[in-house]
Structure formats: structure tokens, C-alpha cells
Amino acid sequence: MLLAFELSGEHETLPAGEILACMRSLDIEHTVVKSEGQCLILKIGDETPAISTLPALLSARLAMTHHIIAVIFECRLSESSILGSVIDAEIAISRGETFSVRARKIQQSPITTERMERLIGEVIFERNRVNGARVNLTSPDHRFRAILTDDSCIFGEVLASTERREFEERKPHKKAFFYPGAISPKVARAIVNLCEIRTGNRVLDPFCGTGGILVEAGMIGASVIGIDVQESMVRGARMNLGAHGFEYQLICGDACNLPLRDQSIDVVVTDPPYGRSAVVMAESIVSLYRYALFEMHRVIVDGGHAVVVSDFELPWTDEIGFTTIELHTQRVHRSLTRYILVLEK
């Protein structure tokens, strides 16, 4: 089975990294067939258990994917090639069912999406006219989608979509407690997923701030623990976490001297303070990161992961005992680049 993931395009590498990490955390056999711009195509193993529920399961976790599509065909980017492929595919609509066709350009393309939607829709309609197939653009039984790249068309049926509105509703300024600089829920969910979290894993954020990362981890079934050196932040995080109905632990403490046993945590995900305006109760930002990473390494189980966000590179993680698995960079503005580092103990 081929699944195409239509990516949000908010980051160059993070959306695909999030998907692949989720596949590993769910033990789904997969092979990358194509990774191009805002589209990732995976071949899913035929022996995958409960494959019919996989798209819904993935869409409930992913933050930077718009749609998950069962690929029907991929062809050259030309009207004749696309329409010929639709005809050859013999797409069948059951009696009385409805459908829609949508197209999206993810790179420069001479083809007009509106025209392509109409032409593909006409082919499917004529093929299924005898069954009473009808077009329904609001709530169809079948949602067909064409992704137009610079040289190809990937066409298939949408199996699941992420609920982008829910992430909008959880934006930092809409929460019970707000503090400037809080991480966005989409980025928080994406970096949580990079850790290959499994249901019930113990997830720690030693710089939890307003609790944004913990909210996203808790919503996908993790057992969350937050620590912050400022009591005001702990109180605010409690307000934000309490609105979601899952269990959590919050502690006012020092990330450089964690009140936790050795190897008591499965995963660490954190966005420590950065920049001159950050409140840092340490000699410097560099020493804060270094000592905190030593503590993270101590409390994480062997084989566990950590995702650490910073505004400078961390060259000494291997000395501490971590192996770097991935590095994602994001240029915020001319003088600030953010590094998202995925580590394994």
C-alpha cells in the first residue's frame, strides 16, 4: 500500500521527520518511496496489523501533515497524462455515493488547479453516472486529491486529515495562562513526535514553562512530568494542563539538579530559555544547557530519546553520552537560527 502525506510546508525537514518517527513508534514497516517538497510517499508493509485504522491513528498524532492519501497513481504532469491515468484507474463509486476532487500545487506548475479538478471530476462522474454518483464538495463519501509537483501528479483518495483547527484553538495566547515566547502547539506536537513516544511513556520537560509541550505529549497518551525553576510558571502550567483531563505532575525545581531517580524517564522533550530576555538562573545559557543535558542523560532510560531546542549548536552532547540522531534547523530571522536536536542515550 502506498500512502502519500501532504505536508504543511511550515518547515523544510520537520514534517517528514515527524511522520517517520511516528511510524517507528507504532512499529509500522515502511519504506520511503519519494520525498519531494511538501509530499512524502511511503510504502507500507502488507503484513502491517490493523492497516485500515493506521491513517486515522496517524492523523490524530501528526501536527505538520494536512492529508493522508491512498495513492491510486502517479504520472507525468500533463493534462493528457493525468486524465488518461484517471480513465485507466477505473475509479468506482458505489451506488448513491458522493465524491469531490481537489487539487493542490506544491511547486510551480503550468496546470490550473480549478481546471484539473473539473476535468478529473467529469471523468469520474461519467464513469459512475449509472450508479447515481453525485458531486458533494462539503461532505462527500469519497475525497479525491491531486498533488501537483513540478514534474508529476500524485493522485489518490484522502483517508484522513489532521484537525488544524484544534491546534489553532490551543495557541499560547488562547490558553488560561499565557507568557510571551511560549512554543506553538504545532511545533510542540512535532518535537514530541520526534521522540517516538509510545502510549504510557514517562515524558519529562525540565524547562516546562507554561506547559505547552506537556499538553501535546499528554494528548497522545504519555505520562507527563514538568519541572520549572519559577513557581509562577509551575502555577501557570497547572492552569493550562488542568483543562485537558489527563494526569500530570508538576514540580518547582532546578533542571541542573533534577529531583528524579536515575533512568526513571523514557523521554525528555524541552525548549529551554534562550536569548537575552530569558530568565536564566545559571552562570550562562551555555552552562545551563550543559549541566541540564548531564541531568537529562542521568534520568533517561538506556535507549531513550531527548529532543532539545536551542538557538546555538550543542557540540558536546557526545561527551555527555548522547548520540545525535537528527538535527533540524529553522531560521527565525537574520540573527536567530533555532536548532532542534534529536538525541538517543
Image (cartoon, grey):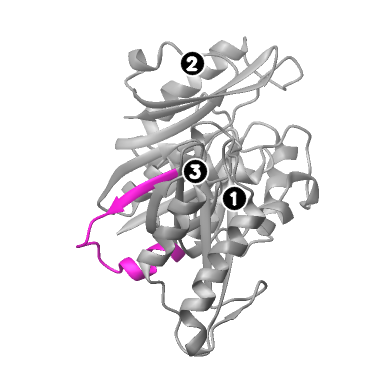
Q: Which mark is residue 104?
A: 1
Relative placement, left or right, of 76 versus 101 is left
| Disc 2 element | helix
**Rendering coords of residue 199 (x, y %):** 40, 57
Give residue 245's quadrant in the image.
bottom right
* Residue range (magenta): 40-56
Identify the amino acid type marked 3: Val
Q: Which mark is residue 192?
A: 3
Relative placement, left or right, of 280 versus 222 is right
Mark nearer the N terminus (2 vs 1) = 1
Residue at 62 percent of width and 63 percent of height: 118
Q: Mark 1: few, some, or many residues within 10 Å (few <14, many ≥20)?
A: some
Q: Mark 3: few, some, or many residues within 10 Å (few <14, many ≥20)?
A: many
Q: Mark 2: few, some, or many residues within 10 Å (few <14, many ≥20)?
A: some
**Rendering coords of residue 203 (x, y %):** 46, 45
Identify the amino acid type marked 2: Arg
Q: Is residue 173 above or below residue 282?
A: below
Give residue 270's quadrant in the image.
top right
Identify the amino acid type marked 1: Arg
Residue at 31 percent of width and 43 percent of height: 33
